[in-house]
Amino acid sequence: MMRDPRIARLVVLIMAAIKPPSGGPRIALALGMGLVCHITFAVAILAMIAAMFFGLSESFGTVPWPWAVLANLALIVQFPIVHSILLTKRGGHLLSRLFPGPHGSTLATTTYAIIASVQLLALFALWTPSGIVWWRAEGAVFWALATAYAASWLVLTKASFDAGAEVQSGALGWMSLLGRIKPVFPDMPTLGLFRLIRQPIYVAFALTLWTVPVWTPDQLVLAVCYTAYCLLAPRLKERRFAARYGDRFQLYRRTVPYVVPLRTPTKDD
């Protein structure tokens, strides 16, 4: 198990954080950022799961119509725009400077996770429902879709683990600061679901959009917009990977399909 780099990285990070070097202010800052990060992350994910389960028919937004159309569209576009910008090289420099002091660079992944979580929470908590419900599953169909919805979230969790749980959750930054070690980013992901397709996180996220048991105009707009994002945005990610990993990524791209698995892995992950 320790030969698995996905687990080995987590073990090293946890061991460094369990017995942190002395430094009260640094430890307090790391723990404080970790608390904010993971609470915000958890609340955002729960809000997202609940809101989409009901087809965005239940939320706290109260913008009057027709202005609600503009407000909801703004909520939709703010996440992919900011998300994509912060993933660029310039965005990374910005993240390092967002937190004042000498630890901004170390905390960049944690800061990024907090920003993304706040964005998602805003989207799903502040959405103004249209009040129109086209279809609500019942009986066996409801349970089938609920199972598919839960399975989609499990696939998304697995894909996030394969990509690097410490980065995806924001733990890398604050735990590295706590242990006073340099953040070590995962290598190009090729294990687990990444052996089947190059973009399992985006595919799994798209699946959560289409397996809900309640359908409304709100959910359809969200599903169409974010599915398009899930298909197009990874192209930018792959440009960064091509520049960073060179021939390794080119070989990976030639042998592993983009979003549709076309072959069976040679061994179980």
Image: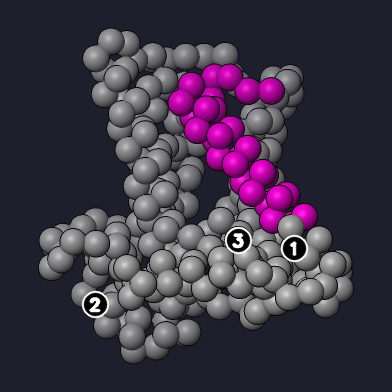
Label 2 sits on residue: 254
Left or right position of 243 against 93:
left
Amino acid residing under circle 3: Ala
Amino acid residing under circle 1: Ala
Label 1 sits on residue: 30
Q: Position of residue 103 (x, y in %)?
A: 78, 74
Left or right position of 20 against 183:
right
Q: Which residue is at the front of the view, 11 or 19?
A: 19
Q: Position of residue 24 (x, y in %)?
A: 84, 67
Q: CA distance from mark 1 to mark 3?
A: 10 Å
Considering the whole magenta stretch, tell me its main secondary structure.
Answer: helix
Amino acid residing under circle 2: Arg
Please tell me which residue is depicted at 64% across the width and 80% down the height of the picture: 182
Label 3 sits on residue: 171
- Say which element carries label 2: helix
Q: Considering only vertical position in the picture, is 258 above or below 139?
A: below
Q: Where does the magenta region start and end? A: 32-60
Please tell me which residue is depicted at 53% across the width and 63% down the height of the picture: 166
Q: Which residue is at the front of the view, 126 or 24?
A: 24
- Say which element carries label 3: helix
Q: Position of residue 251 (x, y in %)?
A: 27, 83
